[in-house]
Amino acid sequence: MNVITCENVWKTFHRRTGQKLFRDHLASWFGGGGGGPHAFHALKGVSFQVADGESVAVIGSNGAGKSTLLSLVTGLTQPDRGSIRIRGRVAALLELGSGFHPDLTGRENIFLNAALLGFTEKQTRGMFDAIVDFSGVKDFIDEPLRTYSSGMGVRLAFSVAVNVDPDVLIVDEVLAVGDQDFQAKCHDRIRNFRRAGKTFLCVSHNKQVLLELCDRAVWLDHGEVVMCGKIEDVLEAYQGRAALPK
Amino acid sequence: MWRGEYRFLLKNLILKDFRVRYRNMSLGVFWSLLNPLIMLGVYTFVFTRIFTTSTPHWAVFILCGMVPFNFFALAWSAGTTSMIDNASLIKRVPVPREIVPITSVLSNCLHLLIQIALLLLVAMLSGITANLTWIWLPVVWILEVIFVCGLALFFAAVNVYVRDTRYVVESATLVLFWLVPIIYDFSMIPPQYRDIYQYNPLAALILAMREILLSARPPSHVLLEKLAAVSLLSFSLGWMVFHRLKNRFYDYL
């Protein structure tokens, strides 16, 4: 049974988006928009499936479309063509501390972040101590976040997120967080998550992490799937890519 | 996609706005009182020393105009920029997008409640006694909040695509200050312009508040019906436009 199914997914961005003028908007609203000379295709017909309980990595060089793909799977934006189907509850960790505010204390940030991730008040109170213990910043929990060291802030953010108990966990390059001890704790947490039969989709550039946590990999290049298969095979091919003639 | 608890999320977002706004100020919440008090002082000087006014209960009269207008202006402009101010949330967390502009309006309500308390206090100090018509006050206030939520949804969505929108809103607020009976009374408007005023929900609200507080009369049915109709229309229109535009927010933020 597939948990994530992507079929021929296209995603197009417009390069001039930033300073688009009013008349361009009028033209695109009334003229149907699409394409145009400033279109940039981030994903060009990407298809892949993730089965229940599988752990899949998305690899590729910068700008290959990995983060766009994760955003689409998370439901932050819609594909221009093709379809994405998800079964079960998804939790995404696309950037640590999005939603954290430096003027709020650690405690207030935990509550805010938990609410954003979709927890109820009761659940949040229930897991509050576990989050604080996991983060190891107990002594500073009532201090504003701006007084934290950057490592402490990231650890707190990660601690809230790893307490998410979804059916599908999506993680974008945030696994290399904190010191060695903390990383070991995080990897333990993800291994437990996998042992519980949950589905895992991640982006990472760290070979060790990928080999340890993933079964399969999808290799993206310039918005297209180059290769899809066992993690070892794909990583090997990906590393040998420089030798390949373009 | 997002299956959390709306009430819990809304509460935390509003608390965040409130804490962030007041925590680093030494006077904190008193700014919400200080601002209208200073303005009240300035208007009182101008209208009793420079121009002369014979309006009874001058302070209540002017606060009836200022309090709703301040809320309207602040909530409208905060709502308009809310999607851009919270771009990091929109791009990274799949929370329902509607909650962002609505939160920015509701967190201004705390500010509003403080100012309403000030208004009622001033009313009682100047000899107006609390009476049963005051129960209409929450009704007209809730209608205004609904109206502003609709505006915030609409302008927040448009501002994502056309960033100049916030400046249009800022200028419109300045113009509105003079076009809404804040420092003058509805009865001073020449008859040929009155009909236009009647369609302005902000003017209707101020009129209703003056009826309630200064004349101890409940607002007229026609006025309430118009206010309710415009508020609901604004909200549903804002909601529809927001819904229509939200799919591409990610690409434009």
Image (tube, coloured by chain):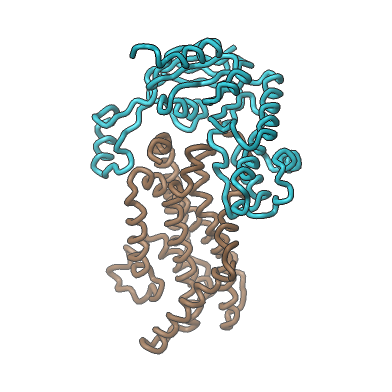
Chain colours: A cyan, B brown
**Residue nearest the observer in this picture, B148 or B247:** B247
Q: Residue furthest front?
A: A243
Q: For the point 39% across and 84% down, which residue is it?
A: B46
Q: For the point 48% across and 40% down, which residue is it?
A: B90
Residue B245 in sight from this viewpoint: yes
Total tally of numbered discs in the picture: 0
Q: Where is the N terminus of chain A found, in terms of image quarters?
A: top right
Q: For the point 52% across and 71% down, which residue is it?
A: B212
**Residue nearest the observer in this picture, B77 or B196:** B77
Residue A126 in sight from this viewpoint: no
When the figure is inspected, residue A137 is found, relative to residue B1, above or below; the finding is: below
Q: Quadrant of residue A78?
A: top left
**Residue nearest the observer in this picture, B51 or A206:** A206
| A8 horizontally vs A111: left or right | left
* Residue B128 pos. (x, y %): 58, 79
* Residue A170 pos. (x, y %): 57, 27
Q: Where is the C terminus of chain A found, in terms of image quarters?
A: top left
When the figure is inspected, residue B97 is found, relative to residue B193, above or below; the finding is: above
**Residue nearest the observer in this picture, A139 or B226:** A139
Q: Quadrant of residue A227?
A: top left
* Residue A19 pos. (x, y %): 30, 44
| B142 horizontally vs B237: left or right | right
